Image: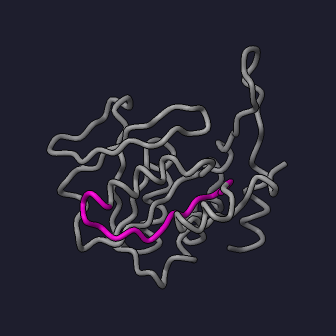
Amino acid sequence: MTAALRARLVELFRWVDPGPGSSHLVSDVSGWWRDPQVLAGLGPALVAPFRTDRPTVVVAPAVTGLMLGPLAATALGVGFVPAHKPGDGRLPAGPLTWAQSPPDFRGRQVDLAVRDDRLGADDRVLMVDDWVATGAQVRAVRDLCAARGAHWVGVAAVVVDLPDPVAAELGARGLLTPANLP
């Protein structure tokens, strides 16, 4: 990743106080999606550490992953498979394989699904997302890959906030850590 892309990601990032009743600040990454140079650089930067692993498909969870996944897939010259959540109102037709995450940073478990005919035993899967805080959704996507017989390559995220042993277990690589953010 170029120093210019890293600097721009940091510059466009904000913490936002959601107001009374909230126990924590929330990340505002909307500036990333508005900047054409960031959009052009994200896909290649995310996949760079995984090129030698030869992923054959990128999988990403709804919602933010649906923006980043195609950028990464395009940079690799491979296809993209969305991991759907039941509450997003856009479940695809056809047989689905489901997995449930362990509790995430909010204590909720997330159900994710992929279409059975979109992921198979010949696939080498790279997951992409904007932020990996606990690895909960990563574990669910990894379980989906295992259920479909696909090979897990790892996960690329813009921000990785995992202890080193967990990052190593999941094959997580990030462009930034929370320590890089204002």
Report the side of 79 relative to 169 (left or right).
Answer: left
Task: Pick whichever, 78 or 109, lies toward us.
Answer: 109
Q: Residue at x 43, y 74 (%)?
A: 76
Task: State whether residue 80 is above or below residue 104.
Answer: below
Give the residue at the far bottom of this rendering: 52
> x, y (%) of residue 165?
64, 64
Q: Is residue 9 left or right of residue 129?
A: right
> In the picture shown, does residue 74 fall above or below 11?
below
Could you tell me if residue 41 is visible in this image? no
Residue 53 found in image quarter: bottom left
- State the image coordinates of residue 140 (x, y, percent, origin top left): 41, 49
Predominant secondary structure, magenta span: strand
| Coloring basis for residues | one colour
Q: Quadrant of residue 41?
A: bottom right
At 60% across and 60% down in the image, what residue appears?
166
* Relative image position of residue 114 (x, y in whole percent): 28, 49
Along the viewing direction, whichever of 166 and 9 lies nearer the viewer: 166
Q: Is residue 103 magenta?
A: no
- Compared to residue 130, the image places residue 145 above or below, namely below
Is residue 106 among what the camera can see? yes
Q: Tell me where the magenta segment starts and ends, as one range.
A: 146-161
Left or right of residue 40, residue 28 in this image? right
Residue found farthest to the front: 165
Quadrant of the drawing holding the N terminus: bottom right
Examine the structure image and report whether residue 153 is included in the region drawn in magenta.
yes
Query: What's the residue at 38%, 38% (across, down)?
Result: 111
Instruction: Examine the rendered structure and indicate whether residue 49 appears above or below residue 63.
Output: below
Considering every residue shown, the one lying at the far right of the view is: 182
> Exactly how many numbered labels are in the figure?
0
Residue at image point 77% right, 27% down: 17
Name the residue at the top extreme: 20
